[in-house]
Structures are given as C-alpha cells and as structure tokens.
Image (cartoon, rainbow, N blue to C red):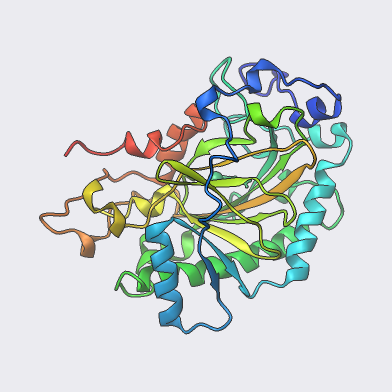
C-alpha cells in the first residue's frame, strides 16, 4: 500500500510541528495577507444571536431560529437539553485522544477517498496551502457507514461517549429542523422530509488546533461554508477562534460554557429557490473560519447533520413561484461532497459556482 494513503505528498501532523518548538511556521501554512486573521478589524459590537431553548414555546423557538438563520446563518443555543456533563466528557475524551502518542493515532490515518480517521488536510491539490489543524472524521449515520473499528479504541470510553453524544445531538437537530420549517410557514416536518425523513446522515469532525508560534500569519481552518445540512459545533469555552462572515466583516464568536453553536449548511440553503436579490429571505449558509493562537491549543467538535446522501435535493416546491424560480440544479449530497473534497476549503465559491445561469 502507498505510504501516503493516497495523499499527493507526505502528511505532516500540525501537532508535531507545534511540539517541535519551531518559532517560525513553514511557508505552506502562511496565508496571503488578505486572508490573514484580523482580530482588530473585526467588530466587537456585533455578535451572533443567543437563543435560550428552556423557556420557549414551539412558536417562539421557530421565530427566533428562523430570524437567526436569515440574518446570520449562525446562532448559539443555551439550555438545549443536552446534559452539560456529557458535553464536557465528550470534549475531554477527544482531547485525550489527541494527546495520545503519535503511533497510536497513526493507526487511524485517513485517505482522501473517505476522509474517515485521523487527518491533517482537506483537498488533494499538490502544493496547496495548508491549515494549522489536525482532525478526526467519523460517520454516525447511516448505520451502514458507521463502523466502530474506524473510531479510536482509546481513550477507553471514547466510542460509548461519542455514541451517546451523537444520539443527543440527533435529537436536538430534529427539534431545530422543525423550528426552521415552522418558521417559514411550512409544516414542521417539511424540511426533515426533504432531507429523506429518517434516512438522514450524520458525521462528526473533531478539530484539534495546536498552539501556533505565528498565529497572525495563518488560519486553523480557512474560510468555508459547511457543505452539509446543518452543523452543531461545540467549542472550548476558554479559547476564542471561530469567526463568522457578516458583510465584509469577520465577527468573532464569544464561547459560552456548555452552549452549542449552530449554523446552516449549503444543503439547506439549496432548498431555497429565491434569487440573490431576495437573499435576506433565505436561510443562509455563511462563510466562517478559525483563528489559532500562541498561548492555547483549541479543540472543537463539529457534528454535521446531512440529507440522505443519494437523494437529489431540489428547492422546496411550495416556495417556488414564477418570479422566484429554482436557483440551483438538483444535486445529491454525495455528488456535492465529491466536488468539494477535490477542491478543499474555498470560501463560498463552491455553492455559488453551482448556480444555474438565470
Ligand atoms: C468545521 C468548522 C469551526 C471550529 O469544522 O467545519 O467550521 O471552530 N469548525 O473549529
Ligand atoms: Ni465549518
């Protein structure tokens, strides 16, 4: 077998670069000046909406979620019903995985065909610019893709805790999908049905961003929008990093203990027929990126909730009118994902480039 597992060049773990104690990062990680993080330039006065789910009726939740998805494409939820102990245990157990000796992690080294396992890059373009982060990617649903053998065996409770965490997040995603649907005046189950009902997919990407000696020159994750349906992100509560696009600004998300950050992905955006002029009326899949820092490592867990992979997704019929024609051609998530994976993170250019010409 090829020792690079199908990658165009040998994989270097960012963690090993970080631990080597180097004071300068390799040029492959240096971003062009226009892409470098700019904490000063980002607005401190703006922040993504925070929604408290504990004290809300279905109607209130639908209108809060719907407004956040139109204006920001991002929001945080607190009192979401997932036990804080489970959330913290999940984070600690995955941090434990990344702190294992390199040989233990290398057993799960991933390839660009499935991405399952331990990885350090996206895209297969030779000589491409790289991001300052390692990750672990695994499938949760459908059950035929879920394979515990491809999940880390250590730390000992990782598989069980990740299973329990996934069940809770699937539940939360179901509630949010209903709110998103209801908030558009549709039947609460409509969005879920267009995703394939009970045959939805889900995967988890745990990101590990080691300390970086020159954080001002690089990014932990380059600007991208999430290709799937919706994302539930759990971040370290003491380390900032995530930035969300707002017009020409980048807004830094303030972590809230035990909260989840939710965002709309490209597949939900593609259910909307509306043209660009009416873009304030759709659920937007918004660009975001991750900054790294010199003082702290950062761990995040991105749970992706996706439509049934081979279902061609087309805009919701009830929303199509003669003056609001379908904007995207029907495409399945599998086809879309393949397209994205060949290219690596590239801002919003991917979803835009698939629009039909009208
Ligand atoms: C992602 C992502 C953000 C973060 O994994 O798609 O956007 O804070 N992660 O790690
Ligand atoms: Ni993302």
The structure residue drawn at horizontal position 84% and vertical position 58%, both measured from the top left corner, is 157
The quarter of the displayed image where residue 281 is located:
bottom left
Q: In this view, does 250 lie to the left or right of 335?
A: right
Q: In this view, does 56 lie to the left or right of 318?
A: right
Rendering coords of residue 197 (x, y %): 43, 65
The structure residue drawn at horizontal position 44% and vertical position 72%, both measured from the top left corner, is 64
Q: In this view, does 86 lie above or below 103?
A: below
Q: Which residue is at the front of the view, 259 or 339? A: 259
Q: In this view, does 114 lie above or below 20?
A: below
Task: Give the quadrant of the N terminus.
Answer: top right
The quarter of the displayed image where residue 232 is located:
bottom right
Q: Which residue is at the front of the view, 237 or 158? A: 237
Rendering coords of residue 244 (x, y %): 51, 47
Rendering coords of residue 318 (x, y %): 22, 65
Q: Which residue is at the front of the view, 220 or 153? A: 220
Q: Can residue 192 be seen in this view?
A: no
Q: In this view, does 281 lie above or below 311?
A: below
Q: In this view, does 266 lie above or below 133?
A: below
């Amino acid at each position: 077998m090829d020792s690079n597992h199908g990658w165009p060049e040998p994989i270097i773990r960012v963690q090993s670069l970080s631990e080597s104690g180097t004071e300068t990062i390799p040029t492959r990680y240096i971003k062009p000046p226009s892409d470098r993080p700019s904490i000063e330039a980002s607005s401190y006065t703006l922040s993504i909406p925070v929604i408290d789910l504990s004290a809300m009726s279905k109607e209130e939740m639908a209108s809060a979620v719907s407004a956040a998805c139109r204006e920001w494409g991002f929001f945080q939820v607190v009192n979401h019903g997932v036990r804080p102990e489970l959330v913290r245990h999940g984070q600690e157990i995955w941090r434990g995985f990344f702190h294992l000796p390199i040989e233990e992690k290398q057993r799960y080294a991933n390839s660009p065909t499935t991405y399952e396992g331990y990885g350090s890059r996206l895209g297969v373009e030779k000589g491409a610019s790289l991001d300052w982060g390692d990750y672990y990617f695994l499938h949760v649903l459908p059950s035929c893709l879920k394979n515990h053998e491809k999940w880390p065996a250590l730390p000992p409770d990782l598989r069980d805790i990740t299973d329990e965490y996934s069940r809770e997040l699937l539940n939360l995603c179901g509630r949010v999908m209903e709110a998103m649907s209801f908030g558009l005046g549709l039947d609460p189950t409509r969005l879920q049905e267009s995703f394939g009902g009970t045959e939805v997919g889900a995967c988890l990407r745990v990101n590990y961003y080691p300390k970086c000696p020159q954080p001002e020159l690089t990014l932990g994750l380059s600007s991208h929008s999430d290709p799937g349906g919706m994302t539930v992100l759990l971040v370290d509560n003491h380390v900032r990093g995530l930035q969300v696009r707002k017009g020409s600004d980048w807004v830094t998300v303030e972590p809230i203990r035990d909260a989840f950050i939710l965002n709309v992905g490209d597949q939900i955006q593609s259910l909307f027929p509306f043209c660009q002029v009416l873009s304030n009326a759709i659920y937007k899949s918004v660009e975001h990126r991750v900054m790294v820092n010199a003082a702290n490592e950062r761990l995040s867990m991105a749970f992706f909730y996706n439509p049934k992979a081979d279902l061609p997704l087309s805009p919701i019929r009830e929303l199509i009118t003669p003056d609001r024609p379908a904007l995207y051609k029907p495409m399945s998530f599998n086809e879309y994902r393949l397209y994205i994976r060949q290219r690596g993170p590239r801002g919003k250019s991917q979803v835009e480039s698939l629009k039909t010409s009208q």
